[in-house]
Image: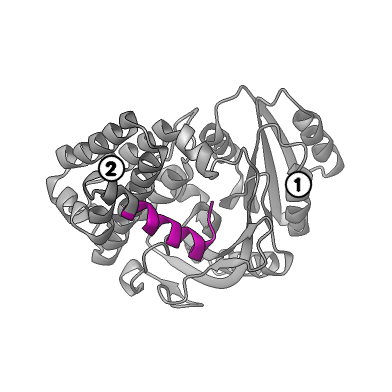
Amino acid sequence: MKLLSITVPCYNSESYMEHCVESLLPGGDEVEIIIVDDGSQKDRTSEIADRLEREHPGIVRAIHQENGGHGEAVNTGLANATGVYFKVVDSDDWLNEKAYMQVLDLLREMVEKETELDMLISNFVYEKEGAKRKRVMNYHAAIPRGEILTWDQVRVFTKWQYILMHSVIYRTQMLRDCGLKLPAHTFYVDNIFVYQPLPYVKTLYYLDVNFYRYFIGREDQSVNEKVMISRIDQQIRVNKIMIDEYNLYDKKRIPSRKLRHYMMQYLEIMMTISSIMLIRSGTQENLEKKKELWKYLKKKDKRLYFKLRHGIMGRTMNLPGKGGRKVSEMGYKITQKFFGFN
């Protein structure tokens, strides 16, 4: 059994996947690197994956499948993982070696002490191409550092200080126990990957290291604004899946008040992102889709709808007329400049 399984979903990734895998190799024999070639046909991804497996036997595994999208690649990685812990690293991203060693030291300690840690959180860095200042997403204000916690010991997350796939390592068996199955042929499923397991997380730990390097800059990248708008139906689908997943007022299923608050905030951010992309598209059709999305939430959970719709973000995303939409876009641009995403 390995300490950590790292899945690397690859789709036509020949120009950057080796850099990613090279950053994972310092983990040595304790780590398995599962390269999932998701039906690549336009380049040498499949060939490179097989070569890396030959060069690093017992560490790198190459799995080839028909194209199913990012979520299906993650599903395949999870199904084949033998590690106690599980992480996803996208093929254009990489890990910081020093922080990597600290992460492995902590996970090894958890296993040796037979401590059941469900989620390890660390920082990630926006490696935005051309940016002089690298934005670091940390959780200093939200999570006490260096100790095993429950949700009730977590502080308040600020807006936009939400946990992304880049931030987390989950216990593998916990992911399987919660029935995680990401939808195929759908982008933005990393939000489901983080959100769905949260009520199953009984213990968490914040390691304050800048571990994950999140590259932003390719024109075809899923977080590029033009690409996000072109795939807005998939973003909406992810929103609806998250809305349907839990009744956030069910205290039996989600007993921690702080976790409920965080999950509501996560949904609020997702609704905001979808709304602003629909506004930015500038089409009447997408403005109607924005109305329909908020109606969907209202039909599913009126109480949650009124909470999110009448919060600051909800009000800003639903201001009437062209003037209201301009205000919404202005708020988005300010946030975009400050946080450095897209």
- Segment tinted magenta in the rendering: 327-342
Disc 1 from disc 2: Cα separation: 38 Å
What label does residue 243 carry, if any? 2
- Position of residue 38 relative to residue 104, above or below, is above
Quadrant of the image occupied by residue 203: bottom left
Prevailing SS of the magenta stretch: helix
16 relative to 145, above or below: above
Residue annotated with mark 1: 59
Mark in front: 1 vs 2: 2
- Dot 1 falls on a residue whose secondary structure is loop
Residue 120 location in percent, x, y? 51, 63
x and y, in percent, of residue 247 in the image? 21, 47
Q: Is residue 280 left or right of residue 323?
A: right
Q: Earlier in the sequence, mark 1 or mark 2?
A: 1
Q: Nearer the viewer, residue 248 or 284?
A: 284
Find residue 141 and name its label. none
Give the residue displayed 51% in from the left and 44% down from the top.
225
Residue 250 visible: no
Which amino acid type is marked by label 1? Answer: Ile
